[in-house]
Image (cartoon, rainbow, N blue to C red):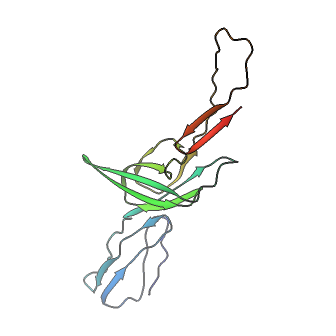
Amino acid sequence: VLEAIVGNDGSYSVENIRSGKYLLKASSKKYYFEEIEVDISPKSLTLPVLNPSKFQVCGSVSLKSGSENIDELKLGIMEFVDSKTSLQYFPFKPPKFCTMISGGKYSVFIESPLQGPQFLPKSIEIDLKEPKSDLLFEKFSAQVSGKIVFKGITNLEKVELILSQGDRQISRK
């Protein structure tokens, strides 16, 4: 294995290489490069230009204090190519997520378990040309209010209000 340091402009050089076939691979935390087979000979002393095939996409989910513990969420990534779409899911443990995806136009969203919390924004549109590390989703939480009106009744009894969703109930007296 021969290694080279890459300069800020992307240039590199490796010395004392013998003729033959080699696998050329670049690695980085924020970029993914495909391996390329190269043939080095006195006639071919220049290596091909390497372009990243994937970029790191990272972000976080803000669950707010006092929130229920969520063990696993799914990062949904919908890609738009011409008039077609493709969808991939990546499970992750909150609050941070990170994955590698190819450059392109995407809609990124958080999917929670059945009847789990919702997140805002509903999705983030990205045109991926470089690593992205600042995606932020926040758990939707609201305070709602209303009023019960008893027409013609002046002596009110205690009233229990129940707000339910599936098997989940919130009760206030």
Q: Measuring 42% from the left and 58% from the top, which residue is drawn there?
A: 89
Q: Residue 90: x percent and y percent? A: 45, 60
> In the image as oriented, which residue stretches furthest toward the top?
152
Q: Residue 139 appears at what percent x and percent y?
A: 58, 44
Q: Is residue 19 left or right of residue 154?
A: left
Q: Is residue 22 left or right of residue 74?
A: left
| Residue closest to the eye, 20 or 123 | 123
Q: Nearer the viewer, residue 73 or 36?
A: 73
Task: Establish if 59 lies above or below 7.
Answer: above
Residue 24 in the image: above or below residue 11: below
User: What residue is drawn where x is 36% and y is 69%?
Assistant: 50
Residue beneath the point at 59% across and 35% down: 163
Report the side of 130 relative to 159 (left or right).
left
- Say above or below: 6 vs 30: below
Percent position (x, y) of residue 156?
73, 18
Residue nearest the viewer, comparing 6 with 138: 138
- Residue 89 horizontal side relative to residue 134, left or right: left
Q: Is residue 170 above or below residue 38?
A: above
Residue 121 drawn at (x, y percent):
51, 41
Q: How many marks?
A: 0
Query: Which residue appears at 37% of the width and 60% of the height?
Result: 102
Q: Quadrant of the N terminus?
A: bottom left
Q: Nearer the viewer, residue 132 or 10?
A: 132
Query: Which quadrant does the C terminus fall into?
Result: top right
